[in-house]
Image (spheres, rainbow, N blue to C red):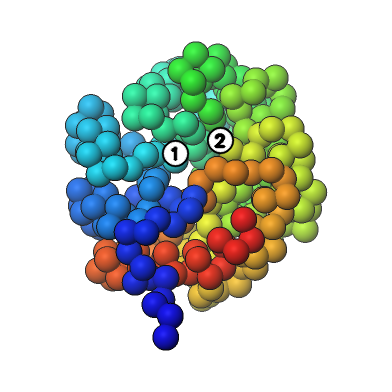
Amino acid sequence: MNTPPSQQLGHGTPRLSLNRWTLRTTSIQEFLETAASHGIDAVGLWRQDVEEVGLNALRRRVDDAGLRMSSLCRGGFLTAADETARAASLEGNRRAIDEAAALGAPTLVMVVGGITPEDKDIAAARARVAENIATLAPSAEAAGVTLALEPMHPMFTADRAVIATLDQALDIAESTGSDSVGVVVDTYHVWWDPALPQAIARAGRTGRLLSYQVCDWNLPLAAEPLFSRGYMGDGYIDFPSITRMVTAAGYTGDIEVEIFNQDVWATPADEATGIVTERYQQLVLPDL
């Protein structure tokens, strides 16, 4: 009998990256050690990890584990109309860019922000995102970091991202005129979009496909819908089809598994990572 991929530890899993929030309740050290023990070469970390461990110490831990970083999450929240709030947001994002560079993360994931009950002008909010991303682009270029705009499912438009489709994200990225601004294809957020094949092809054609993140769409939705992400294969997303689109678009980077799910967080880290690895090898890797 063949050994399941989840038990084939230490042999390397091509292009698989484990996002920190997949094992959110695990300590950062155990997270890094678990990823390495499963033959995973890359990790996506969060700025909370920088706050907890310290920038230089975190870089040392990643290096000591024999890992590299695929991305840092997150920058963004660029929709404020108030000038003081806008200035503070820009300054915070410049710090995030510097942190990504210091950690060796090629990409900073940008969750652009929602609207407020006081200001319901969504078109104006999107325009501010475009303006502020253009303002940040030179800092990213100087640091050697790319800014990956993340379109999010429309149910998150109010509070997290006024960009709901990949085409909207690409419109903003292209408007900056900077090669350092592109997009994230996150299956959880974009799988429903009927224009997805053309949008992914556009991202590849324009050189702006910077990150590919995978997890499934589970039902019923959790009380916090963001926590309805699941292991690939547990829900409704056609991973082979989307992966073929991304591959055809010329993407050759890491594929991050990013799952926000309380049941996954309650699972021992080694077991959860084994499931991630096995599902990746079954549903994603064959179509790369």
Q: Is residue 98 above or below residue 255?
A: above
Res. 73 visible in picture:
no
For residue 240, the mark is: none
- Which one is nearer the viewer's eye here, 71 or 250? 250
Helix, strand or loop at label 2? It is: strand
Relative placement, left or right, of 123 versus 79 is right
Image quadrant where one finds the N terminus: bottom left
Q: Is residue 39 above or below residue 235?
A: above
Relative placement, left or right, of 276 versus 115 is left
For residue 71, the mark is: 1
Residue identifier under label 2: 148
Task: Name the amino acid, label 1.
Answer: Ser
Q: Residue at x 32, y 64 (%)?
A: 9
Q: Position of residue 43 (x, y in %)?
A: 38, 46
Image quadrant where one finds the C terminus: bottom right
Helix, strand or loop at label 1? It is: strand
Measure the C-alpha gap from mark 2 to mark 1.
9 Å
Task: Name the amino acid, label 2.
Answer: Ala
Q: Residue at x 64, y 44 (%)?
A: 251
Q: Position of residue 279 (x, y in %)?
A: 48, 69
Q: Of discs 2 and 1, which sits in the foreground?
A: 1
- Which one is nearer the viewer's eye here, 93 or 157? 93
Are the residues at dot 2 and dot 1 in contact (C-beta closer than 8 Å)? Answer: yes
Q: Residue at x 43, y 80 (%)?
A: 2
Q: Give the image quarter of residue 97.
A: top left
Q: Position of residue 131 (x, y in %)?
A: 63, 21
Q: Position of residue 160 (x, y in %)?
A: 51, 45
- Which one is nearer the viewer's eye here, 223 or 219? 219
Q: Residue at x 38, y 48 (%)?
A: 41
